[in-house]
Amino acid sequence: MLNAVDDALRQNGLTVGADDFRRIPVIGFRTQPNLFMDQLEAKLARKGWRRLTSGVAEGA
């Protein structure tokens, strides 16, 4: 089952600039949330979003 998590992380990493979606299996979000959220934050940053000091993101 954890192979699906590794596969999703790997596929998300390969499609960084191509797709506007991330694959986040529930088990992955439960076991490695920081890795998936880092990928999501990086994707949003490339789309113009930025993190505020309060920790809340907003559109640029």
Image (spheres, helix red, strand yellow):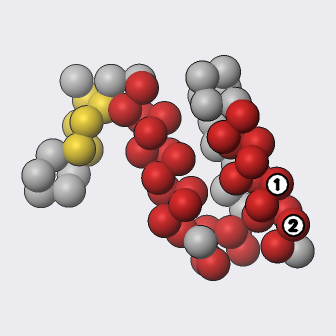
Position of 48 with respect to 56 (left or right) is right
Given the current orientation, which residue lies at the most extreme left position? 53
**Type of the residue with mark 1:** Asp
Contact flag, marks 1 and 2 (Cβ < 8 Å): yes
Q: Quadrant of the C terminus?
A: top left
Tell me the residue at 44%/39% (across/down): 42
Give the secondary structure at mark 1: helix
Within the image, what quadrant is residue 33 found in?
bottom right
Between marks 1 and 2, how big is the CA–CA gap? Answer: 6 Å
Q: Specify the amino acid type for callout 2.
A: Asn
Q: Position of residue 53 (x, y in %)?
A: 11, 52
Describe residue 27's horizontal placement relative to residue 54 as left or right: right
Q: Which mark is residue 7?
A: 1
Q: Is residue 24 above or below residue 60?
A: below
Crowdedness of circle 1 by 10 Å Cα count: few (<14), some, many (20+)?
Answer: few
Q: Which residue is mark 2?
A: 3
Q: What is the quadrant of residue 28 in the picture?
A: bottom right
Q: Find residue 18 and report its horizontal and vertical position in percent.
A: 66, 21
In the displayed structure image, the side of residue 56 where residue 30 appears, left or right = right
Numbered label tally = 2
Q: Check the picture and name the quadrant holding the N terminus.
A: bottom right
The structure residue drawn at horizontal position 37% and vertical position 32%, both measured from the top left corner, is 45
Q: Residue at x 87, y 66 (%)?
A: 3
As rendered, which of 42 and 25 lies closer to the eye? 42
